[in-house]
Amino acid sequence: MKLNVDGKTYDIVIERKSTTRNTYIRVKPDLTILVTTNKFTTTKTITNLIEENYEKLIKMIEVQEKKKENNDGFFYLGHRYDIVYVDSPNIEFGTNKVFINRNFDINKWYKNQAKELFLEHLNTQYNKFTKRIPYPELKIRKMTSRWGVCNIKMKVITLNLELIKRDTKYLDYVIVHELSHLIHGNHSDKFWALVEDNMPDYKKYRKEMKEFWT
């Protein structure tokens, strides 16, 4: 099955499972429309469901296309660069281009940049924080579903390496978020009030960051 939207064609993949009672529709990062349903659901029923949810599907496709746009290319501190491969072993930046070797270890370079930058921003936000809290240990690793994690018991904050690709205002928000967990271990109203006290625009940043995930 396929879905046509303004001259573009999107594949529809149907997964029938005996354990699934309801029918679910989602758009995958590769823009494939995945329908998960019961094994007894007819193709006609699925077709009708696609037609009934046409407008919602268009919005879902637009969201995934926006996420794809926000992840294609080389990103560093909120700026997107087109990659130009060169023989030099070093990395060099132009206005809108980055010149690197095909064998260049980008993740290693990102991590080296993040070590100093993330620590600097942690110190800044910690020193400005409105509550007295223990100074946390900082760890950095690549994560697929969280921007940051706070181990309250061990007093360790782990930041997602992916933040090195984004504007530092998002890094600061995540740091404030995790520092706030050292006071409130949940996402209660008191927690969010503390976040807002230290980052008044956190709602705006939080909403914008949803466009980065693929």
Image (cartoon, rainbow, N blue to C red):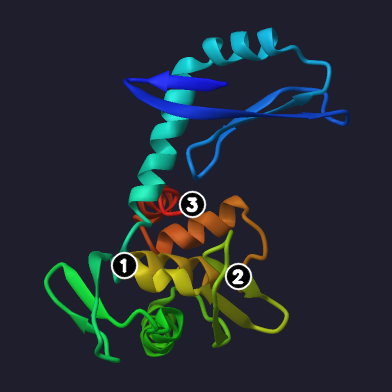
Q: Nearer the viewer, mark 1 or mark 2?
A: 1
**Quadrant of residue 50 in the image?**
top right
Q: Which mark is residue 75?
A: 1
* Residue at position x 30%, y 91% in the image: 89
Q: Residue furthest left?
A: 95
Nearer the N terminus, badge 3 or badge 1?
Answer: 1
**In the picture provided, is 65 more to the left or to the right than 39?**
left
Considering the numbered disc 2 on the image, is that residue within a helix, a strand or a loop? strand
66 or 139, which is in the foreground? 66
Residue 136 is at least partly visible in this image: no
Check disc 3 and report the residue beneath it: 214
208 or 193, which is in the foreground? 208
**Real-space Cα separation, disc 3 to disc 1, in angstroms:** 14 Å
Q: Nearer the viewer, mark 2 or mark 3?
A: 3
Q: Which x, y percent locates residue 32?
A: 53, 35
**Real-space Cα separation, disc 2 to disc 3, in angstroms:** 19 Å
Considering the numbered disc 1 on the image, is that residue within a helix, a strand or a loop? strand
**In the picture provided, is 121 more to the left or to the right than 41?**
left
77 or 24, which is in the foreground? 24
Asked if 124 appears above or below 175 in the picture, the reply is below
Nearer the N terminus, badge 1 or badge 2?
Answer: 1
Considering the numbered disc 3 on the image, is that residue within a helix, a strand or a loop? loop
**Real-space Cα separation, disc 1 to disc 2, in angstroms:** 23 Å
Looking at the rendered structure, the kind of residue marked 2 is Val
Check disc 2 and report the residue beneath it: 149
